[in-house]
Image (spheres, grey):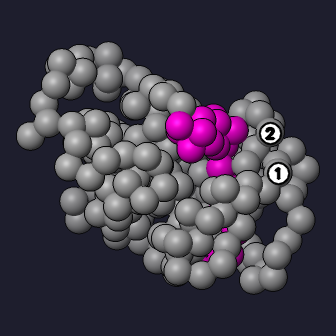
């Protein structure tokens, strides 16, 4: 359903979806503990109140969303473990969250696509799909879900309602179908551990 010309460009789509900055846009679990109380933004990141509202809705508790100010600093901090040690610094560059914590961290580009869409702009749907999936995935981690496949499959299930409620997608629309097509492509490009359940 919802097949359009946009969906016929599979090769370029896949190429874009698997580019390093978005591969496994979802995240990585780090091992240090994060206090439940509000924390100041780490150097090079800032808090997003708009994304906080969305993540709080998914996480079912009050959370904080920190956006990187730019992607180079994000990569440097993530790879250096400044935001917490990652299981694999080479992947998961779109977002980070510790299961059960109250703060998630997003790359600049992830936030940029989400906020542009929130402004009712029309950024690239492939990027929007990967970015919403990342936000929802990290928010599911904040529920306390640790296992990556459970997290990503839950995120895929939640994503249509999140897209409709917060990101101006119309329920049942072709555009929403296309969004989910790209989200599933992004999911499919992730490591095997993310895909054991769906
Ligand atoms: Zn994850």
Identify the residue at horizontal 9%, vertical 40% (top origin): 1
111 to the left or right of 189: right
- Residue in front for this viewpoint, 94 or 163: 163
161 to the left or right of 58: left
For numbered disc 1, what is the local secondary structure? strand
- Residue in front for this viewpoint, 66 or 87: 66
Q: Dot 1 corresponds to which residue?
A: 46
Label 2, ligand 1: CB separation under 8 Å: no
Measuring from the top left, give residue 71's x and y in whole percent: 72, 33
Judge the density around disc 2: few (<14), some (14-19), many (≥20) Cα neighbours within 10 Å: some
- Asked whether 22 falls inside the magenta stretch, the response is no
Identify the residue at horizontal 31%, vertical 47% (top origin): 170
Measuring from the top left, give residue 74's x and y in whole percent: 74, 41
Total labels: the figure holds 2
Identify the residue at horizontal 36%, vertical 21% (top origin): 15
Tell me the CA gap for discs 1 and 2: 7 Å
35 to the left or right of 176: right
Q: Which residues are drawn in magenta?
A: 99-120
Residue 196 in the image: above or below residue 126? below
Specify the quadrant of the image occupied by residue 55: bottom right
Is the C terminus in the top left, top right, bottom left or bottom right quadrant? bottom left
Measuring from the top left, give residue 58's x and y in whole percent: 49, 70
Q: Are marks 1 and 2 in contact (CB under 8 Å)?
A: yes
User: Which label sits on residue 175?
Assistant: none
Judge the density around disc 1: few (<14), some (14-19), many (≥20) Cα neighbours within 10 Å: some
Identify the residue at horizontal 18%, vertical 18% (top origin): 5
- Residue in front for this viewpoint, 170 or 150: 170
Q: Dot 2 corresponds to which residue?
A: 69
Specify the quadrant of the image occupied by residue 160: bottom left
Residue 86 visible, this angle:
no
């Amino acid at each position: 359903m919802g097949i359009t010309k946009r969906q016929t460009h599979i090769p370029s789509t896949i190429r874009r979806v698997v580019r390093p900055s978005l591969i496994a846009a979802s995240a990585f679990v780090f091992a240090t503990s994060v206090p439940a109380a509000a924390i100041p933004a780490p150097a090079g990141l800032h808090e997003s109140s708009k994304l906080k509202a969305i993540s709080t809705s998914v996480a079912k508790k009050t959370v904080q969303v920190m956006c990187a100010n730019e992607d180079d600093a994000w990569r440097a901090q993530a790879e250096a473990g400044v935001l917490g040690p990652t299981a694999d610094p080479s992947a998961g560059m779109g977002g980070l969250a510790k299961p059960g914590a109250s703060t998630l961290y997003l790359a600049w580009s992830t936030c940029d696509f989400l906020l542009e869409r929130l402004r009712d702009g029309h950024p690239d749907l492939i990027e929007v799909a990967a970015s919403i999936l990342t936000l929802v995935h990290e928010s599911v981690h904040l529920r306390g879900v640790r296992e990556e496949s459970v997290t990503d499959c839950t995120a895929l299930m939640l994503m249509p309602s999140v897209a409709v409620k917060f990101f101006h997608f119309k329920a049942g629309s072709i555009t929403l179908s296309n969004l989910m097509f790209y989200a599933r492509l992004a999911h499919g490009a992730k490591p095997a551990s993310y895909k054991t359940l769906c």
